[in-house]
Amino acid sequence: MRLDKYLKVSRIIKRRTVAKEACEGGRVSINGKVAKPSVDIKEGDIIEISFANKKIKAKIKNISEHVKKEDAKDMYDILEGEEDKD
């Protein structure tokens, strides 16, 4: 699955266009390397995202095309930082 789509489906980032812009701006890395939005991700990868005032580091647990909102948190483990509360 593409990185930008995973970020949207897992609800780490709410919109795919925002996820794409974050990747193109160099604010998203996979396993320590800056990643483009089209990069294929796999289970076990470590994603790091730099937002304006915080950083999130998460490990991908599973990849699924369609996920209910309440099940989206099960797609990844937060290693560092904090996720949104909504």
Image (cartoon, rainbow, N blue to C red):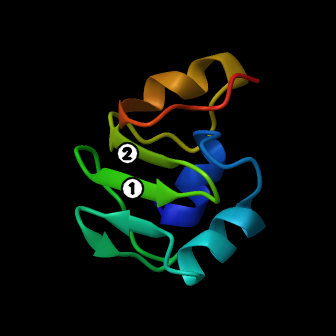
Q: Which amino acid does label 1 sit on?
A: Glu
Secondary structure beneath dot 2 equals: strand
Work out whether 63 lies above or below 75: below
Q: Nearer the viewer, residue 41 or 51?
A: 51
Q: In percent of the image, x 55 and y 48: which residue is there?
A: 54
In the image: residue 47, left or right of residue 25: left
Q: How many marks do you count on the picture?
A: 2
Quarter residue 44 falls in: top left
Residue underneath mark 2: 57
Q: In percent of the image, x 63 and y 38: which residue is there?
A: 66
Work out whether 20 lies above or below 85: below
Q: Which amino acid does label 2 sit on?
A: Lys
Q: Are marks 1 and 2 in contact (CB under 8 Å)?
A: yes
Q: Residue furthest front?
A: 53
Q: Which of 51 and 17 is in front in this view?
A: 51
Instruction: Give residue 69's position: percent from left, percent from top.
Output: 71, 24
**Sequence-first disc among 1 and 2:** 1
Looking at the rendered structure, which numbered label has been put on residue 48?
1
In the image: residue 60, left or right of residue 54: left
Task: Characterize the local packing of mark 1: few (<14), some (14-19) or many (20 or more) Cα atoms within 10 angstroms.
Answer: many
Task: Characterize the local packing of mark 2: few (<14), some (14-19) or many (20 or more) Cα atoms within 10 angstroms.
Answer: many
Work out whether 21 lies above or below 18: below
Instruction: Give residue 5's position: percent from left, percent from top.
Output: 60, 59
Q: In percent of the image, x 46 and y 22: which residue is there?
A: 74
